[in-house]
Amino acid sequence: MIASDYLNQINQYNIRQAWPNPERCALLVIDMQQYFLSILSPILDRVLSIIEACRSRNVRTIFTRHGHADVAEDGGMLAKWWGDLIECGSKDWELIKSLIPTHTDRIIDKNRYSVFKGTDLDKSLKSKKIEELIITGVMTNCCCETTARDAFVRDYRVFFVSDATATVNDELHVASLKNLAFGFAHIVSTESLCRYLLKHNL
């Protein structure tokens, strides 16, 4: 489904308009790992376009990588719920090869849906005076949505990219977009976000 279709489906909820301030914003690229290759492949080009646009404005880029070092110790409810978890250090755990983090980017390892849980992300962002987050990656209704909600309650302004996030089907994807638009995030398209960033880079 194309971005305009997603935005049309949620337009009654997506009523708050804003654009990111590059000087106070960071980009989160969530769990673009080999394990999720079939889910992320349709959005890969758009995620790469956003990374490029953000780098042109010196927006900090943060990649997350989900994995478990010892399921008995760090699996928790995820292990009980899913049974199948990503093992740290495995091929499935690796970021896809199309993503090439630079020396200024950061990779955060996590073992829960929210990127904030058990990491220093909040402290790190606040130390750099980051107040806004752009969210891309997978899965829309699990790690992306949970991170967006967690960011909102920590008082970050959230920009959630409708066609640069993905999950197992459109029904779940659109449901998350509606919930986020209603209470947690500005839902934007890749095209509009990149156009805004690149236009203001002239």
Image: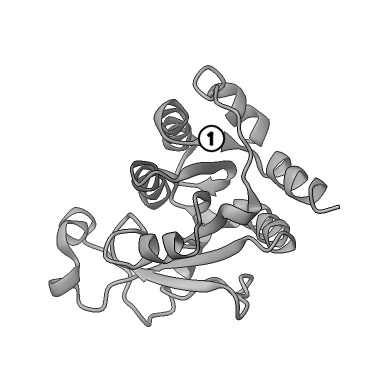
Q: Residue at x 71, y 61 (%)?
A: 52
Which residue is more in the foreground, 86 or 118?
118
How many badges with numbers are in the image? Answer: 1
Q: Residue at x 38, y 80 (%)?
A: 90
Q: Residues within 10 Å of mark 1 (few under 14, many from 20)?
A: many
Which residue is more in the foreground, 76 or 27?
27
Relative to 146, is 36 on the left or the right?
right
Q: Name the quadrant containing residue 31.
A: bottom left
Q: Residue at x 16, y 56 (%)?
A: 77
| Image height of 157 relative to 47, above or below | above
Please name the colour scheme applied to the rendered image.
one colour
Q: Position of residue 161 (x, y in %)?
A: 57, 43
Relative to 106, is 190 on the left or the right?
right
- In the image, what residue type sits under mark 1? His
| Image height of 7 relative to 73, above or below | above
| Quarter containing the N terminus | top right
Q: Which residue is mark 1?
A: 186
Q: Name the quadrant containing residue 50.
A: bottom right
Q: Name the quadrant containing residue 182.
A: top left
